Image (cartoon, helix red, strand yellow):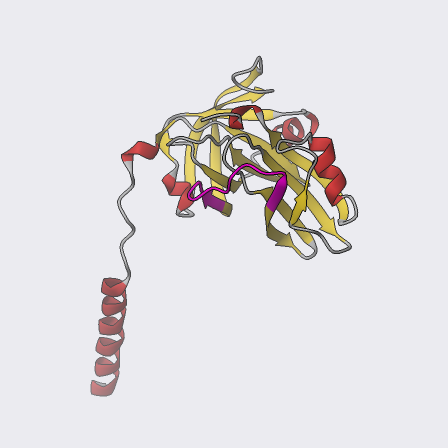
Amino acid sequence: MRLIYLLLCLLFTCSALAEEKKPKPEPLDPMYHGVHPMALVNKGSNIYAVNMSGYRPPHDLQIVYQIKNPDVAFLNLVKDAELVTIKPRAFNIQRLLRGEEVTINADVYMGHFDRGGNLFYANRTIEFTDKIYAREFKDLQDSSQWQDYDYVDIKRNERIYIHKTQKAPSFSHLVYIDMTGACLQKFRTSKRVPKESELIYKFVNCGTLKPLYYEAEDFQGK
């Protein structure tokens, strides 16, 4: 009995020490508390939120997050519409940068929320569940005809390629690929801000693809 007691004490002591050594996260920067519009895209039944970036805080980062699929009607909206955007209530986007699970309320628009889109759902609950990708706009490359992409593996042979936004003029671009061949992560385009069709052509030999998101207007100047 005494041995069991000592072992239990040792176990609880080690657990307490582990908790003490666990580093505390840095305080949230209040500068990043605000309204963070996002585009919603899908692959199959998975829905992803892509923040609508800009060059100045609190929008100077790229984030792709999986959100909980609430129902078939919501999924069909994202699948069938050319563009779906959300305008969330104000929150600190650094919580997503950390990879937290976050629940917010947002207005959901068919089309661009600020360019003539139609309100489809008001004050809809959006649950951010898994961080797929995050990048802060630090030390951006000069605008160039050379385009550089990151990618994230979604599942076997499936990837999302994400353009690394440069200094203005530039663009945001995401494409899903079910890989069947090799794929370049860096290539030259005809212009610093090419059309989406030219970018898709660069990936056409990689496998089965689905364009997810393209935005250039917000990246033409600081």
**Residue at 26% across / 44% down in the picture?**
27
Identify the image quadrant of residue 97.
top left
Please tell me in which quadrant of the rendered image residue 209 appears: top right
Q: The C terminus appears in which quarter of the rendering?
A: top left
How far across and down, in percent of the image, does residue 41 sit? Answer: 61, 34
Q: Main secondary structure of the magenta part?
A: loop
Q: Nearer the viewer, residue 103 or 151?
A: 151
> Which quarter shows the N terminus?
bottom left
Q: Is residue 211 left or right of residue 137?
A: right
Q: Measured along the vertical axis of the image, is residue 123 above or below residue 127?
A: above
Task: Judge by depth and name the residue closer to the eye, 170 or 155.
Answer: 170
Q: Is residue 131 found left or right of 209 in the rendered image?
A: left
Residue 74 sits above or below residue 175 on the image: above
Residue beneath the point at 64% across and 54% down: 155
What is the magenta range? 134-148
The answer to whether residue 34 is above or below residue 5 is above
Is residue 138 inside the magenta stretch? yes
Residue 142, magenta (yes or no): yes
Q: How far from the left and from the top, in percent, is residue 121?
A: 53, 20
Q: How many marks?
A: 0
Location of residue 32 by image quarter: top left
Spot occupied by residue 201 in the image (x, y as percentages of width and height): 76, 39
Q: Position of residue 181 (x, y in %)?
A: 77, 55
